[in-house]
Image (cartoon, rainbow, N blue to C red):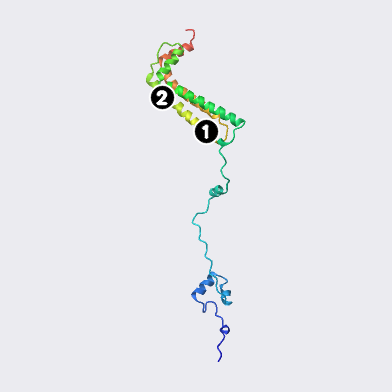
Amino acid sequence: MSTPDPDDRPRPQYGEYASAEEQRARIRQPDATDALLAGQALDAPATPAPASSAPPATLAEQTRRTASPPSTSALARPLTGWRLADRIVTFGLLAYGLFNVIATSVQLFSFEQYANTILGLFGVDQAFTNVAQGQLWGTVAGITMIVGWLLTAALTWGQLRRGRIAFWIPVAGALVVSIAVSIFITVPILNDPAFGELFNQVASPGR
């Protein structure tokens, strides 16, 4: 009696005699059924690449990655033409403004002496007597000049770093600060009798 050929046996239907491992392989690989029927060994399923833990880049991050390296600051570029002239004028105005701020604020912090100097220049024999109010507003005016120059210098520096015309900033800053300081020192002057006499002399020069 001859031994039956294994190939003569009926092939198992899908899932009839398949083991659990073969079933999982067929589910994972669509071509596994054809390979098993053909008597071929199953290839190990490819392990999926682990998902990156980093969140997807935002539009801003993608722009930063693809953008070219930042260009050199405007301060490092060669100065030619109008840019050189603007730089010279701007620093000259800032230097003059700093000298004026130091000289004037020192006098404003001693407002009584400052007021008496003005009265002497106009030939008024009386002394400044509104000392308390003058000292208060003189200090406010002096601090305003210092803070105003610092803000002006900061704005000017930022404008220069961007490579833009900056000479107008010291001019505008000086104008704004001068108006504010004039208002502050006018308050004690208007309430002082000696300056009242000075105003009368100016209003009636023939008297």
Residue situated in front as seen by the camera: 5 or 165: 5
Q: What residue appears at the point 43 percent right and 25 percent down from the top-left corner? A: 142
Left or right: 176 as drawn, with respect to 139: right
Closer to the eye: label 2 or 1: 1
Label 2, secondary structure: give it.
helix
Instruction: Examine the rendering and report whether any part of residue 171 can be seen.
Output: no
Residue sitting farthest toward the bottom? 1
In space, the residues marked 2 and 1 are separated at their CA atoms by 27 Å
Count residues near mark 2 (Cα–Cα under 10 Å), then give few for <14, some for 14-19, many for 20+: many
Q: Is label 2 in contact with label 1 (beta carbons under 8 Å)?
A: no
**Which percent across, then down, holds residue 158?**
52, 35
Residue drawn where x is 44% and y is 21% of the image = 185
The foreground one among 1 and 35 is 1
Residue flagged by tag 2: what amino acid is it? Answer: Thr
Rendered image: mark on residue 157: 1
Residue that mark 2 sits on: 139
Q: Is residue 186 above or below residue 2?
A: above
